[in-house]
Amino acid sequence: MLLDKTNLSLDSSGSNKQNKRKIYIQGLLTSLTNPKVALFFIAFLPQFIDTKAAGPIPFIILGLTFTFTGLVWCLFIAYFSSFISQKIRDSERMGTYLNKITGIIFIGMGLKLLQTKAPQ
């Protein structure tokens, strides 16, 4: 990869091959079946709810606040990633740099692997 003169071939049409609904459902199922999310809410959420308050209103307000801030953050990350990846796709020089950096990382990982001792 260090000696390769071609740029990284990133095809922008490949992202449209999957159906957007399928991608959304896959992400939703991943989030819903992740036990860490449920454990987080069980352990973290009750600390911010007044036990003397009646009804589910405090839970709803806190849940909506968490959802809104998460939505804003995820939208920022998605748009920023889309912007950066489009810049990388459009730049031949950036593809060449990425190949070089990847080659250096592979060499570094190989050297690190040489330093490890086998278990006895």
Image: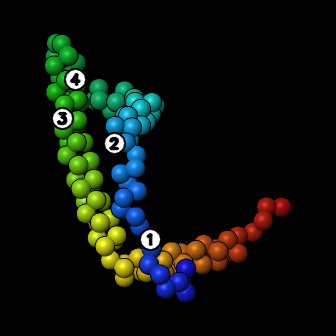
Q: Amino acid at mark 3?
A: Thr
Q: Amino acid at mark 1?
A: Ser
Residue that carries the numbered disc 4 in the rendered image? 59
Q: Earlier in the sequence, mark 3 or mark 2?
A: 2
Q: Earlier in the sequence, mark 4 or mark 3?
A: 4
In the rendered image, residue 6, in percent from the top left (x then y), is placed at: 47, 81
Crowding around mark 2 (Cα neighbors within 10 Å: few <14, some 14 to 19, many 20+) is: few
Question: Residue 20 — which label?
Answer: 2
Q: Which numbered mark, 4 or 1, is in the foreground of this view? A: 1
Q: CA distance from mark 1 to mark 3?
A: 41 Å
Q: Residue at x 27, y 53 (%)?
A: 78
Q: Earlier in the sequence, mark 1 or mark 2?
A: 1
Q: Amino acid at mark 4?
A: Phe
- 119 vs 61: above or below: below
Secondary structure state at the residue bearing disc 4: helix
Question: Residue 9 — which label?
Answer: 1
In the rendered image, residue 24, in percent from the top left (x then y), is placed at: 35, 38
